[in-house]
Image: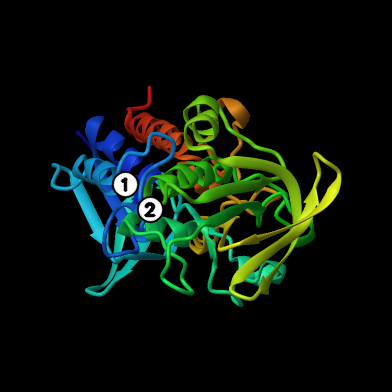
Amino acid sequence: MNGKNIMVIGGGPAGLESAAGILDLGYNLILVEKRESLGGTPISASYAALTPDMEDTEVAMARMVNSVVGKENADIRLGTSVVSVEGSAPDFLVTLESPSGVEIVNVGSVIVATGFKHFDPGRETQKYGYYEYDDVITLVDAEKMLKSGEFVRPSTGEKPKRICFIQCVGSRDRQIGNQWCSKVCCGIATKEAIEIKHLVPDCTVIVFYIDMRMYGFWEDELYWKAQEEYKVNYIRGIVSEVTKRGDTVVVKGEDTTMGRPMEVEMDMVILSVGMEPSDGTIAMAEAFNLPLECHGWIETIGGALNTVQTPVNGVFVAGAAAGPADLEDSISMGGAAAMKACAFVRRISLPTV
């Protein structure tokens, strides 16, 4: 057993995978999570089911949490924040603050797994009416409704007859500075469309998209399944405005395939909001003097062959703290970061010859 602690900051999927890997390799873990429970955004945002396999979120995340909680050499700090960092690897002095007080801990290596935040569609895109119309919601709002097992119009409490998704809200948008694809929105919208059809079989569901980006097996497991089995309609187009007409929401824009204007009335509009660096990610970048890449996420230096190494010796990053990532990316990066953090601690503990 190596005496050096390895700290993981963030208790979401990437952080939990890192934590489990560290314990499996026989090293001491300090897991820091600012929330009062583990599970990260999938739990705090009440995701109904995970993409793409649609496993119940609570069941899946409980399995990950149980791989860490109660294990030997696991020191789990909930409701705890990193407030400052001094020193360098392998002797970081990290100041932690929790309701019980302030404590300084010594760690040999650190994994930052502080994730992302959802884009606020009212901040820049008032044309979609998110804060104006009750029946305009986001993917996150829809997840909460799906989790409850009842999908109804917020304005009336009635089941909707016509729903549409608007893709790339807060992503691929140079005007607001978000020049990236958030990678998961097409898949999550499609997953939600299938779930809506389960709850409201007679509802017409339309997805307005710029480009459908279904990576790997998502193409078959979600995209074609939604069309062929659940009759979800996909229309390539650009939505320019969402307004109100009577008790319906009016979506205006251009059908770019047909090259003509479009105007359709909907009972509900779901905005497929993208990812942005979380406040915690920005804070940890400042605390550990981690450079940000040009889009504002934590920079890595290994390119495609090493996605978890930061420019700061002994500090690694996992999951969406390094950029838009799906669940599969986050788990892979969490495991890689654990291996590299343990290897770093082992290497510096070996006697010099």
* Residue drawn at the location 32% of the way across and 27% of the way down: 351
Instruction: Inspect the image, locate mark 2, and give the three-letter code of the amino acid beneath it.
Output: Tyr
Residue 43 is situated, as x and y percent measured from the top left of the image, at 33, 55
Secondary structure type for disc 2: loop
Residue 46 is situated, as x and y percent measured from the top left of the image, at 36, 58
Task: State whether residue 254 is above or below residue 217.
Answer: below
Say left or right for 308 vs 126.
left
**Which sits in the foreground, 309 or 16?**
16
Residue 80 can be seen, yes or no: yes
**Which sits in the foreground, 156 or 297?**
156
Residue 102 is situated, as x and y percent measured from the top left of the image, at 29, 72
Q: Residue furthest top?
A: 353
Using a 10 Å C-alpha cutoff, classify the residue at mark 1 as few (fewer than 14 neighbours), some (14 to 19) or many (20 or more): some
Using a 10 Å C-alpha cutoff, classify the residue at mark 2 as few (fewer than 14 neighbours), some (14 to 19) or many (20 or more): many
Q: CA distance from mark 2 to mark 1?
A: 6 Å
Total tally of numbered discs in the picture: 2
Instruction: Inspect the image, locate mark 1, and give the three-letter code of the amino acid beneath it.
Output: Thr
* Residue drawn at the location 46% of the way across and 47% of the way down: 192
Q: Which residue is mark 1?
A: 57
Residue 275 can be seen, yes or no: no
* Quadrant for the N terminus in the image: top left
* Residue drawn at the location 42% of the way across and 36% of the way down: 337
Q: Which mark is residue 285?
A: none
* Quadrant for the C terminus in the image: top left
Task: Evaluate if marks 2 and 1 touch, with contact meaning CB atoms under 8 Å apart.
Answer: yes
Q: Which residue is mark 2?
A: 47
Secondary structure type for disc 1: helix
* Residue drawn at the location 61% of the way across and 36% of the way down: 301
